[in-house]
Image (cartoon, rainbow, N blue to C red):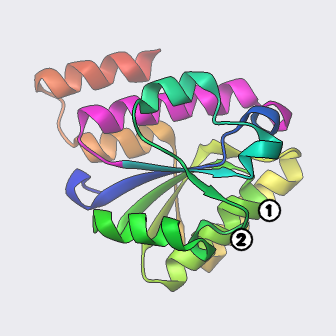
């Protein structure tokens, strides 16, 4: 199971034009907001990317606001791992368990997840926080990541797995987030 001290939340390409064209964009964005907020409470670092922001736009405003001063890693490669600044940042965190969310499941999320697995990271795909322009592409991306060795999880499952105990101020704050 994942623990905060070993986990990093990776958000892939949740950008303007792309974010509006995927299946269930509001649900995906809401779940990613929950993940960001919960990770803040649980002291889990966040790393995020933007695919060719000049063309696709910046990270959607509600998420960008939650991410505060964090800067995105810009890329043009589909796999985040093929961008050296991304790999440098990832290594600095020294975390083995990567919670993966973002877009599109069958392209950037899939290629990144497979390469992370090849590099020895444990990939935990947050299935209700990923999407593609078609349900078929989303589903095939999820299946292929699982077949490659990634673990499947959901927003609530990951958050409660990181939390582990139903008491105290963290639990109260997390409960409010989950119930929204």
Residue at (40%, 66%) from the top-left corner? 90
Q: Quadrant of residue 94?
A: bottom left
Q: Is residue 19 magenta-colored? A: no
Whether tag 1 and tag 2 are in contact, CB under 8 A, the answer is: yes
Residue 104 seen in the current view: yes
x, y (%) of residue 131? 73, 45
Q: Quadrant of the N terminus?
A: bottom left
140 lies left or right of 4? right
Q: Which mark is residue 144?
A: 2
What residue sits right under mark 1 in the picture? 140
x, y (%) of residue 70? 42, 40
x, y (%) of residue 2? 31, 58
Most common SS among magenta residues = helix
- Which segment is the magenta one? 20-45
Q: Is residue 164 above or below residue 115?
A: above
**Spatial separation of the CA atoms under disc 1 and disc 2:** 6 Å
Q: Quadrant of residue 97?
A: bottom left
133 lies left or right of 66? right
């Amino acid at each position: 199971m994942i623990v905060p001290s070993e986990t990093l939340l990776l958000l892939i390409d949740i950008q303007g034009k792309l974010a509006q064209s995927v299946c269930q964009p509001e649900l995906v964005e809401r779940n990613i907001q929950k993940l960001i907020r919960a990770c803040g409470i649980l002291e889990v670092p966040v790393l995020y990317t933007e695919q060719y922001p000049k063309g696709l736009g910046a990270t959607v405003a509600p998420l960008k606001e939650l991410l505060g001063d964090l800067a995105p890693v810009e890329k043009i490669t589909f796999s985040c791992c093929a961008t050296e600044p991304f790999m440098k940042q990832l290594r600095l965190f020294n975390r083995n368990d990567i919670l993966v969310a973002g877009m599109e499941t069958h392209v950037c999320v899939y290629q990144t997840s497979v390469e992370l697995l090849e590099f020895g990271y444990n990939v935990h795909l947050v299935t209700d926080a990923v999407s593609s322009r078609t349900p078929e592409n989303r589903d095939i991306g999820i299946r292929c990541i699982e077949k490659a060795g990634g673990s499947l999880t959901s927003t609530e499952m990951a958050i409660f797995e990181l939390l582990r105990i139903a008491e105290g101020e963290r639990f109260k704050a997390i409960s409010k987030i989950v119930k929204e």
